[in-house]
Amino acid sequence: MTKSEKPKIGIFSLTGCGGDQLMILNLEPVLLELLSKFDIKDFQEGSSYKEETELDIALVEGSVSTKTDLEHLKKIRERTKMLIAIGDCAVSGCVQAMRNGQMSMAERMRKVYGVNEDYYDVLEPKGLSSYVKVDLEIPGCPIEKDEILHAITSLLHGDMPKEIDYPVCVECKLNGYPCVLVEKGMPCLGPLITAGCNARCPGLGLDCIGCRGPIPNEANVAAELKVLLEKGYDEQYIFNRLRFFGGNFEDIQNLTRKVSEKTEKEEE
């Protein structure tokens, strides 16, 4: 690509709700000017025009939940210089992964649909990086408009955005918000969850539900569990809360197995 050429970009969706593409469309004040800086080759929610060609940047939302998803993802990876996972589904599997580590796909298919595992084209839901190289991950359910705007404009100028590696609690303190976990005893997941939302929920007096997913390799699940147990919440409640957006994280899966085994013993 020469300096006079526009970067070729594609925006794709796998298994998900489409909310992350919608957030890009919701950048109304700057959307047309921003997109005019790129040569858009594919934008599922924004245009019916599609061109199978090499790309400079591919934005991909949605988890890999089917063999069709995986095939599509691999083809995107082959044709793009940079692949960016946008949204929790693409980063970690999100709500589709909430049973991962607890129940096999075969068992899920039998219990939910009454069919064998091979009846549908299914895989255990996972983020893109489980299968291909991902150059940048932007979490969120959905993504933050300011964050995706910053990422796209940075790339336009040849800069790689820095991924956020600190918890929601940092933004909470920077904004001067009272700690809803300590002061109100609410089951806030802020200590575990990747920042970037400007602590929106605590700023409204609500507890963080974890919609940006746990901080990779940093989230101290054991410490959060201890605090919430001391606040009077039972393990099953905590487990349900953690797995909603964190089903693919090993520490949460370990807690999942522990609680499931305990529940099974109590039912015997």
Image (cartoon, rainbow, N blue to C red):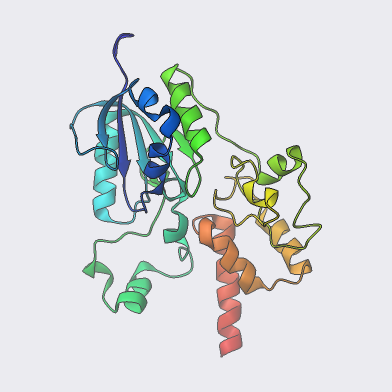
**In the image, residue 53 lies at what x, y percent?**
20, 28
121 horizontally vs 226: left or right? left
**In the image, residue 37 lies at what x, y percent?**
35, 20
Q: How many marks?
A: 0
In the rendered image, the vertical position of residue 251 relative to residue 128, given as above or below: below
- The residue that appears at 60% across and 71% down in the rendered structure is 258
170 horizontally vs 82: left or right? right
**In the image, residue 187 lies at what x, y percent?**
69, 62
In terms of image quadrants, where is residue 112? bottom left
In terms of image quadrants, where is residue 239? bottom right
In the rendered image, the vertical position of residue 163 relative to residue 168, given as above or below: above
- The residue that appears at 61% across and 38% down in the rendered structure is 165
Q: Nearer the viewer, residue 72 or 267?
A: 72
Q: Quadrant of the N terminus?
A: top left
Q: Nearer the viewer, residue 168 or 221?
A: 168
Specify the farthest residue to the bottom. Answer: 268
- The residue that appears at 24% across and 46% down in the rendered structure is 71
**In the image, residue 98 lies at what x, y percent?**
48, 63
- The residue that appears at 70% across and 58% down in the rendered structure is 224
In the rendered image, the vertical position of residue 232 relative to residue 134, given as above or below: below
In terms of image quadrants, where is residue 266? bottom right
